[in-house]
Image: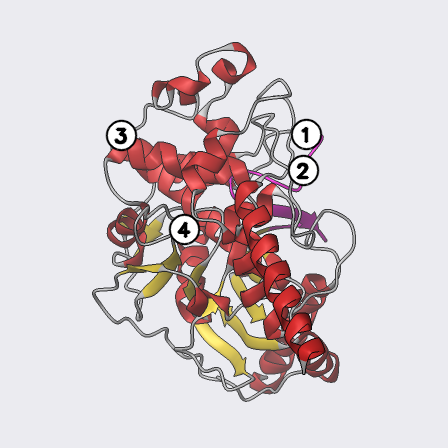
Amino acid sequence: MNLLKKTLKWALLSVITLVAVLYITDTDYLIKAVRTVYFKGYTTASINDYVYFDNAVVHADASDEWPLHKDYNKNTATKKLSALHKSQGSVAYLIIKNDSILHESYHDAYDENSKSNSFSMAKSYVCGLLGKAIMDGYIESLEQPVSDFFPQYSDGLSAKVTVGDLASMASGSSWIEDYYWPINITAKAYYGKELEETILGLSTVKTPGRAFEYSSGDTQLLAMVIEKATDKKLYDYLSESFWIPLESKNDALWQVDSKDNDHVKAYCCIASNARDFARFGKLYKDHGKWKGQQILDSTYVAKSIQPRFKESPEYGYGFWLQKRDGKSFFMMEGHLGQCVVVIPDDNIIVVRLGHGKESFGRNPYNGDITVYIEEAYKIIADAEQNQS
């Protein structure tokens, strides 16, 4: 009995010491990470974990149902697609052809109204909000320096950083992107409660405006600029600029670092559904118009879906890009294979949400997403063949 008491005592002291060390070393966010990831059986953030964080509401104000194609769901998923859904844990898959839903499927108890974490698809919305802020006159242009909003960026290389550099991920920031190793700035931003302080603690280590280097920190700083310029919370600006005008059916949730600080995790973490996510893809496909109304400047849209740097043809301003078979693709993409893929040449939108992804290389089109696109074309071809 005495041995048991001593063991429990030392175990308790060890836990108290560990917690104290985490707070002293400013790594106490690891407690949240362990509780929401490893104790839930995951090795990284998951599409359901938004329920463990504080969230702000992105309000919808109208319900506009997507039209259903006359051949809606008459063609089932191919064997290859079904196998991929199963192996990678897809929860939603949507094919929109000529602005009508041709095919959709849901898995793992999800349906068309279920919320799922979009992760970095949120970056496309933030870059869209930059275009909206320019259109509304809050921000001068892509060339406006960040120092106009944050004096911390007034010296050295930092003075050269523009809002366009942030949107195209070319700021030269010291941010290091890592989704699996817990002791890094990516994890601290995701699980911590001092998001603005974390971002403003970054430095500029490379000449801005020279090259693309994927950085969630760039998007987060861009969001902070937009909030300063508009004097509006980003989730409210998203609601009034896009979520309501695009007639989204459901309110969305956008994670914040804490209720007290209320700093939105702009680089990630809008929780919504496949149908409502698809609306933003359609807006860009239609050059910023929605039902005849110019919601977003068409010139800005066109610039966003073209590469800024010829050395990095895979990225524009908030969108992943690809050219193949003589066609242009642009995509909103997030951790674990969340995506809204738009193929304007064929008037197609493909949406996939799910638990996992297999890929290779730094371009997310590689791997699963290519299969989701290819199998969508097969389903469309089968539907068209049935019509003839």
Q: Earlier in the sequence, mark 3 or mark 4?
A: 3
Element type where label 3 sits in the image: loop
Helix, strand or loop at disc 2? loop
Q: How far is mark 2 from mark 3, CA to CA? A: 29 Å
Q: Which residue does the numbered mark 4 point to in the structure image?
A: 257
Q: Which corner quadrant of the image does residue 276 belong to?
A: bottom left
Q: Is residue 185 magenta?
A: no
Amino acid carrying mark 4 in the image = Asp
- On the image, numbered disc 3 is attached to which residue? 138
Q: Nearer the viewer, mark 4 or mark 1?
A: 4
Is residue 75 or residue 19 the one in the foreground?
A: 19
The residue that disc 1 covers is: 310
Image quadrant assignment for residue 230: top left
Label pair 1/2, CB-CB below 8 angstroms: yes
Q: Secondary structure at mark 4?
A: loop
In the rendered structure, the answer to whether residue 337 lies left or right of residue 49 reads right
Q: Position of residue 25 (x, y in %)?
A: 58, 41
Q: Nearer the viewer, mark 3 or mark 1?
A: 3
- Residue range of the region highlighted in magenta in the rendering: 310-329
Marks 4/1: CA–CA distance: 36 Å
Give the residue drawn at x 74%, y 56%. Answer: 366
Q: In what element is the residue under mark 1?
A: loop
Who is closer to the viewer here, 287 or 129? 129
Kind of residue at badge 2: Pro
143 shown above or below 299: above
Q: Is residue 165 above or below residue 97?
A: above
Do tag 4 and tag 1 residues touch (Cβ < 8 Å)? no
Q: Is residue 234 visible?
A: yes
- x and y percentages locating residue 199 in the rendered image: 48, 35
The first of marks 4 and 1 along the sequence is 4
